[in-house]
Amino acid sequence: MSFANLKRQSGNLDKLSKAIEALSQSSEGGSEKSDNFWRPEVDKAGNGMAVIRFLPASEKDGEDNLPWVKIFSHGFQGPGGWLIDNCLTTKNQQCPVCEHNSALWNSGIEANKEIVRKQKRKLNYIANVYVVSDAANPQNEGKVFLFRFGKKIFDKITEAMNPEFEDESPINPFDLWKGANFKLKIRKVDGYQNYDKSEFDKAGPLLDDDEELEKVYNSEYSLQALLTNADEWKSYDQLKARLDKVLGLGDSAPKTTVEKVKAENFSAKPTVEDVEPAIHEEDDDMAYFAKLAEED
């Protein structure tokens, strides 16, 4: 979409509202290896704050795409090391990790279900953001980055678009003119990062100068490229080989419970509903796992 058309459509929530509704009815689904990603920094107590602005869909991705992409990923450690990879169900393909988890879950053994809870796919969203304020890293201010976030922050976005109370006006958080800055507030609660205090500021233009806004718009990254970059996605066979190595599976290894289950043709199509949600769902799980893997 051209910048001129983008401005003409400013304030229109129809497309995003339909997308939100579709997401709530589906169970579809990254890595963070690129320097293009921005991550908020927290202090020793686990607290931090920054101000960002979610940006509209990039012109590079065309008019029909949304200003975010939804990616599922797996991150866990086994006797053979770490598995930190994107889940192929993101692209509606079969995933060997999900198949393995499904067989474990359907075995009916509680110990296996506990294993699945640790290995289940995790949902993340990725969007372009403009960093308004980043006291911990001021060199990031005024720049465009990719930002990976979880369901809790996405819920803040949907709440802004669909406010609960009559005295609140809906906003399009991704609008350059009628959107709003997002005050990201991070606290450590019970050992997990908590985003409950985060909130949108009052609606208004990101910048007063349209020429500067156009520069921001033209600086955005393609989100669709994240789904097609071969470096970010293993094939089914590659992911299966990695899974076997991490968990110590394979033809020469003793049959595990899950393999016995598979041998009895006791399997099911893996879905998010197959696995009970975790009590704590931290947005930065994958980055945390990647850091641990680097330290090993």
Image (spheres, rainbow, N blue to C red):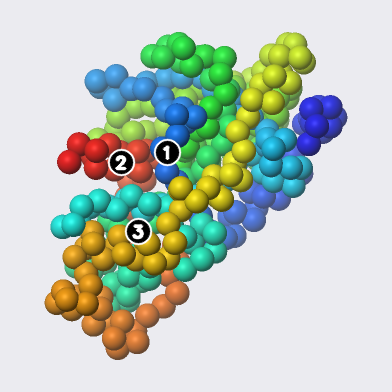
Taking the spot 69% from the left edge, 26% from the top edge, the residue there is: 218
Q: Three-letter amino acid code at disc 1? A: Glu
How much space separates mark 2 and mark 3, taking CA atoms?
A: 16 Å
Q: Secondary structure at mark 2?
A: helix
Amino acid type at image mark 2:
Ala
Badge 3 marks a residue whose secondary structure is loop
Callout 1–callout 2 Cβ contact below 8 Å: yes
Q: Give the mark, 1 or 3, whose residue is nearer the N terminus.
A: 1
In primary-sequence order, the first of circles 2 and 3 is 3
- Tally of numbered tags: 3
**Distance between the alpha carbons at the discs numbered 1 and 3:** 19 Å
Q: Which residue is more in the foreground, 198 or 164? A: 198
Q: Secondary structure at mark 1?
A: loop
The residue where tag 2 is placed is 290
Q: Quadrant of the N terminus?
A: top right
Tell me the residue at 45%/34% (across/down): 34
Which label is found at residue 120?
3
Q: Residue at x 33, y 33 (%)?
A: 193
CA gap, disc 1 to disc 2?
9 Å
Q: Which of label 1 and label 3 is nearer to you?
A: 1
| Residue 6 left/right relative to 233 | right
Label 1 sits on residue: 32
Instruction: Check disc 1: other Cα within 10 Å, few if <14, some if 14-19, many if 20+.
Output: some
In the image, is residue 136 above or below residue 92? above
Whether residue 168 appears in this view of the structure is no
Amino acid under disc 3? Lys
